[in-house]
Amino acid sequence: MAAGGGGGTGHGAGPGGGPGARRGSAGRDAEAEVWCRRVRELVSAVPANRLCFECGQRGVTYVDISVGSLVCTGCSGALRGLNPPHRVKSISMTTFTEAEVLFLQAHGNEACRRVWLGTFDPRTSLLPDSCDPQKVKEFLQEKYEKKRWYEKVWGHVYLGQHSVRTPQSIFCPLTAGTWHQNR
């Protein structure tokens, strides 16, 4: 293993030499930094990820690990208040696991839009004003709790380090299990 933790650039290549590799504190820190950098790259590399998935505001600062989207600070708090609460993590103040990064890479705001706003029609429904927390909360309840605009699409199921496509379910890191789309 190369100094500094090494690291591949291919999909799923881990920075620390693979599962079970023994690393010291410096190796773990280097690995954590690689995963954090990959999350930050998702924001800069994909234009749709630069705007909050929930309200469209510029400057995302959190990721919604429950669905794989990138959101602003205000919406991160509103997502935590849903039933069940979404798992959100700060992009700059936390570390990410390999599974979380792979999940985010496979999703992002555009993929989430196709799923959670698949039948959304801007002519008949409006996105909430980010300055009105109550409207944002109501919109999120319609989107996630009632699944008002939900559209079934092919999802990914993560099984260890392998990914398979399936029309029946998607992996939900919030519950660490499979969430079936035909609920």
Image (cartoon, rainbow, N blue to C red):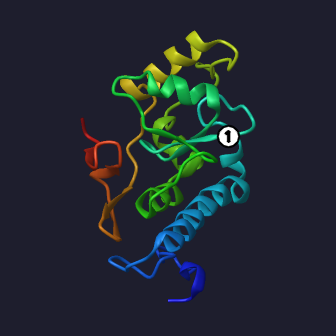
For the image shown, how many numbered marks are present on the structure?
A: 1
Front one among 148 and 86: 86
Asked whether residue 121 is in view, the answer is no
Within 10 Å of the Cα at label 1, are there few (<14), some (14-19), or many (20+) other Cα atoms? Answer: many
Instruction: Look at the image and tell me in which quarter the C terminus lies.
Output: top left
> Quadrant of residue 132 in the image?
top right
Q: Is residue 42 left or right of residue 67?
A: right
Q: Position of residue 58 (x, y in %)?
A: 75, 36
Q: Residue furthest bottom?
A: 1
Q: Position of residue 27 (x, y in %)?
A: 51, 74
Asked whether residue 63 is in view, the answer is yes
Q: Position of residue 117 (x, y in %)?
A: 51, 35
Q: Residue at x 68, y 20 (%)?
A: 130
Q: Residue at x 60, y 57 (%)?
A: 39
Q: Residue at x 71, y 60 (%)?
A: 45
Q: Residue at x 40, y 79 (%)?
A: 18
Vertical relation: 64 (above or below) 21: above
Front one among 60 and 154: 60
Vertical relation: 8 (above or below) 105: below
The residue tagged 1 is 60
> Quadrant of residue 97 in the image?
bottom left
Vertical relation: 53 (above or below) 39: above
Q: Report helix, strand or loop for mark 1.
A: loop
- Residue type marked 1: Val
Front one among 11 and 97: 97
